[in-house]
Amino acid sequence: MRRVRNLILMGVITFAAAATAAAHCQIPCGIYDDELRVKMIEEDIATIDKSMQQISALSSGKRTALDENQLVRWVMNKEDHAQKIQDVVTSYFMAQRIKPVPPSDTAGHAAYVTRLTLLHQLQVEAMKAKQTVDPLHVEAMRQLVKAFRKAYFGEEGPHTH
């Protein structure tokens, strides 16, 4: 019994460590690809969109056991990709890449607040995407990423940051 409990405990610890390692490290490694992270968020948004469409299609009319199974899988997929957005926003951009700017630097502080505000709004829209199948949240996330890209990289694009 004790051996089984220890095996289960080791499995849980391994799973937790693997989930944590999926995000980019929070040590000063200097290896950053901000544009890749934005593209990953855009891909997650597209996946959420597809998941919502499939959930809506599978939810109409009489369902078979296979339909029920697929419905659950699409819901889990939608939740997973919304969580990925929240994780990249929090663990990568907010914790590592967006640096605080003192209010005395008026222009810099305004840009800092804009970036944080856009990321927070993206977090909230990802949460709402978990709770619903409303495509308005997908469109809101797309617009927020577009605005964040401009606020973060500037007009010239990602290679100037």
Image: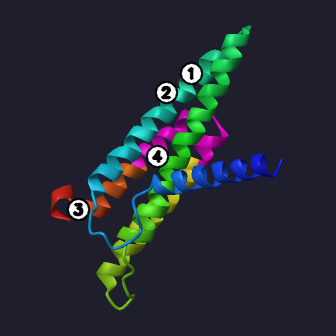
Secondary structure state at the residue bearing disc 1: helix
**Magenta-drawn segment:** 127-143
- Secondary structure type for disc 2: helix
Q: Which residue is mark 3?
A: 154
Residue depicted at x 68% and y 19%: 69
Q: Is residue 5 visible?
A: yes
Amino acid type at circle 1 is Gln
Alpha carbon distance from label 3 to label 4: 19 Å
Residue at the (57%, 35%) spot, across then down: 78
The C terminus: image quadrant:
bottom left
Q: Badges 1 and 2: C-beta atoms under 8 Å apart? A: yes
35, 9: nearer the viewer: 9
> Which residue is labeled 1 in the image?
54
Which residue is denoted by mark 4 in the rendering? 141
**Could you tell me residue 83's position as x and y percent?**
55, 48
Label 1 Cα crowd, 10 Å radius (few <14 / some 14-19 / many 20+) = some
Spatial CA distance of label 3 from label 1 is: 36 Å
Question: Few, some or many C-alpha atoms within 10 Å of disc 4 (few <14, some 14-19, many ≥20)?
Answer: many
Mark 2 and mark 3: Cα distance apart in space: 30 Å
| Mark linked to residue 113 | none
